[in-house]
Amino acid sequence: MQRPSVSHLPLVGLILAVMVLSGCDSEVQRACPDVDWYQAGYQDGFAGERGLRIENVRVTCSKVDAWNKPRPDRALYFSGWKKGVIEYCSPANGLALGKKGVSFKTICPAELTTDFENAYREGRKAFDGRQSLDARKGALRKQIKQLEAEQYQLKAQLAQSENQSEYDLTRNRLRDNARRLRESTDELQSLEATGRGVK
């Protein structure tokens, strides 16, 4: 079966959006009879929803079309919903969700759960790794700024030293500062190079 297009807003969303944005019942009346129940179900399944929104659409349509009392095509809806759930529970989607760092919904059937959750954990591990990497790079950038400011101050102090003892002490502090600055800069450059290869 060809995968339904996900580029169009399902009419389930259209109904709710029209009501919220325009408050115009006539637009909803035109939309309700034309709901693509297969596509609505597919969208809900692919979003990890439990298939309960079909009732929300039925109630909404009934309110604005009380005479006809439009009935959802449950067979079509749940056929699309099952297709959407299968794609939601695919290892590829699990990996993608994990890499985004978002929680997954416990909707997958038993036969799909293991592969889906294993892929999700792999993606989540990559996400957590990026988070740790970004945190360390942020700390290094802050440290480098502090060391650069200290270096400027130490150079000024060195130039104003009043005796050899004070000069030697400040010079040693300056050397230590320069070493720490070099190490922090090298580590940051290394992490940034590593980060460019992380997807």
Image (spheres, rainbow, N blue to C red):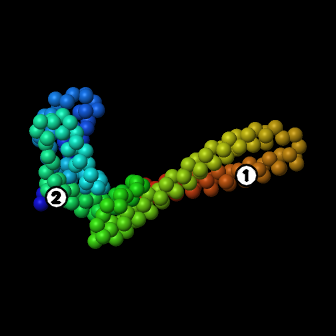
Q: Quadrant of residue 148?
A: top right
Q: Are marks 2 and 1 in contact (CB under 8 Å)?
A: no
Viewer-side residue, 14 vs 128: 14
Q: Residue at x 18, y 34 (%)?
A: 64
Amino acid type shown at disc 2: Ser
Residue 193: in sight, yes or no? no
Residues at marks 2 and 1, CA–CA distance in whole angstroms: 71 Å
Q: Which mark is residue 29?
A: none
Query: Which quadrant holds the N terminus?
Result: bottom left
Taking the spot 26% from the left edge, 36% from the top edge, the residue there is 17
**Residue 125 in picture, x, y percent from top left:** 44, 63
Residue 170 image point, x, y percent: 80, 47
Figure check: 13 above or below 179: above
Choose the circle earlier in sequence order: 2 or 1: 2
**Is residue 71 visible in this depiction of the protein?**
yes
Q: Give the crowd class for mark 1: few <14, some 14-19, many >=20 residues within 10 Å.
A: few
Disc 2 secondary structure class: helix
Q: Quadrant of the C terminus?
A: bottom left
Q: Is residue 191 above or below residue 156?
A: below
Residue 185 is situated, as x and y percent measured from the top left of the image, at 59, 52
Hey, what amino acid is under mark 1? Arg
Q: What residue is disc 2 on?
A: 79
> Taking 136 as reference, is 163 left or right?
right
Q: Secondary structure at mark 1?
A: helix
**Which residue occupies the extreme front position in the image?**
67
Q: Mark 1 — residue?
A: 175
Residue at screen point 71% across, 43% down: 150
In the rendered image, residue 144, in percent from the top left (x then y), is placed at 62, 47
Q: Is residue 136 left or right of residue 60?
A: right
Q: 9 or 59: nearer the eye? A: 59
Which of the two marks, 2 or 1, is nearer to us in this view?
A: 2
Q: Residue at x 89, y 43 (%)?
A: 163
